[in-house]
Amino acid sequence: NSKSWQERLQCIYETSQAGPFTKANNNFERLAKYNINNDFRKAVGLIREMKLAGQKIDPRTYVKLIRMCGNNRQSHHALDLYRMFKQEGYQLNMSICRSILSSCCKGNNSEAHEIGKEVLSDMRSQRLSPNAYMYRIVLSASNARGKVEDSLYLLEELKNISPVVDEKVSLDTLKACLVAGFWQESLVLLEDLLDVTEPSIQLYKQILAVCARHGKWQPVEKIVESMSLHEVRPDEEVWNLVVQSCCKAGEWKLASKFLNDSKNSGIQPSLFAYNMAILACEKEGQAKPATLLLDRMITEGIKPNQQTYTAAISTCVRHGLADQAHILLQQMKDFELQPSVETLNKLILTHKLHGEYAKAKNVFDQFSTVGVQPDAGTYVSLLACCNNQSVDIQTINNLLHEATTKELSNTFAYNAAINAMSTCGYTKQSLNLFESMTENKVNRDVTTFQVAMKACMRSGDWEKLLQLFNRMRAEKIKPNKFTFDLALLAF
């Protein structure tokens, strides 16, 4: 102990040929040095060499190295050392178990919960009783990996040895249950948690935030009832989270109910809550409820914003309600809101259903008056409205040229133009455009073949249709259901 590292290493060097005993000592000297220098990689490698050479490693050395690996977030090395420790036939103790749990379950190990279960099982087999700290470590790992059934089992075991369960552990398990869809279990855990902690609005907000983030609407109504039962008054943020939970899952009816509940409780629904409800209507294609919610907002003195109108106009697009969409656009102007390019593109698409290119062009002409620059999607939307012979071939070519000069996949633009030419009766030109994609170095996809095959179907050229279908395989493009259906029509 009085010698310096240099003196000890010199001594080892001078006696390196003395025999296996000295060689073993040399290995332990190296291990001690690696431990001091925190060089876990070399330490683990040396342990493996020593085992192959038949040298027995002291159990305390294993504990030190496992801790070192844990401190460096090297859980896989720590696990390897733990399994070597067991292979040596050493008796487990609380120190080694605590070290391996801290190393593996707190590291970035995808199987952390399985390792934790293995250690707890090993402890029981050797009649060691895991303490509450160990259970909490494994519980946290199980919750992080969404292993809810394991978490619930471990939580019950933890309650048996510690009547007062840590609030954070219970809350984390509750959140994991919500994410995994264990609604009933999450509600039971909530009531258990409220038995040991003071009900607070912050606690409910944490739980509802998980529901809102993952669109878990099923337990929300019960959670709101629990707040009422424990005399916790919801504020605006709570109602926002409640509505968001429903809207993310497209539950617009339930969202509308909670908007009413919010108002009845004395909290005016926020712009955010209304926007979320209208977005839910858009998601489910519910145009009438969306416009009713918009009218209700205005009646209650809440000024809509650009997002509100974009969502409402989008619902009109899905139903081809062009007149209603134009009314909404005028309302935007009345509120001095500038429509975004996305809003105007969607307004153009309301004319797709009836092939009203002239009306779609009128919307396009408004871009300059409101100071909005068209993007590639604008020209593709216009191409989608070219559904009758009133649109000439030059117009379609011009729209294609504009679309391909913007930041958009040229494949997408070509697909729209081929479809527009075909729909307007320019079958030959649409197929020529299809062939020109090779020369213009534009990749084809399954939609490209689909619209080209439709052009052949409209013109009755079944032979060409089958040729295109066979070319898909040659170009290593997997046919979809629509292309198969078109090919079957040729027989």
Image (spheres, rainbow, N blue to C red):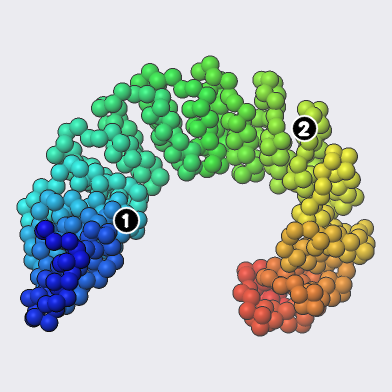
The reply, left or right, for residue 37 in relation to residue 451 is: left
Foreground tag (2 vs 1): 1
> What residue occupies the far top of the structure in this picture?
266
Residue found at x 59% / y 35%: 276
Question: The residue tagged with tag 1: helix, strand or loop?
Answer: loop
The reply, left or right, for residue 1 in relation to residue 186 is: left
Under mark 2, the amino acid is Leu
Q: For the N terminus, which image quadrant?
A: bottom left
Residue found at x 78% / y 36%: 338
* Position in image of residue 284 (x %, y %): 61, 44
Q: Which residue carries the number 2 mark?
A: 337
* Position in image of residue 349 (x %, y %): 78, 49
* Position in image of residue 326 (x %, y %): 81, 38
Q: Which sits in the foreground, 248 or 481?
A: 248
Q: Which sits in the foreground, 465 or 192?
A: 192
Q: Quadrant of residue 118?
A: bottom left
Under mark 1, the amino acid is Arg
Query: Disc number at residue 246?
Result: none
Q: For the C terminus, which image quadrant?
A: bottom right
* Position in image of residue 103 (x %, y %): 26, 54
For mark 2, does the 10 Å Cα neighbourhood hold few (<14), some (14 to 19), or many (20 or more) residues? some
Q: Which sits in the foreground, 4 or 262?
A: 4
Q: Which residue carries the number 1 mark?
A: 73
Q: Quadrant of residue 290?
A: top right
Residue 119 seen in this snapshot: no
Q: Which sits in the foreground, 381 or 37?
A: 37
Question: The residue tagged with tag 2: helix, strand or loop?
Answer: loop
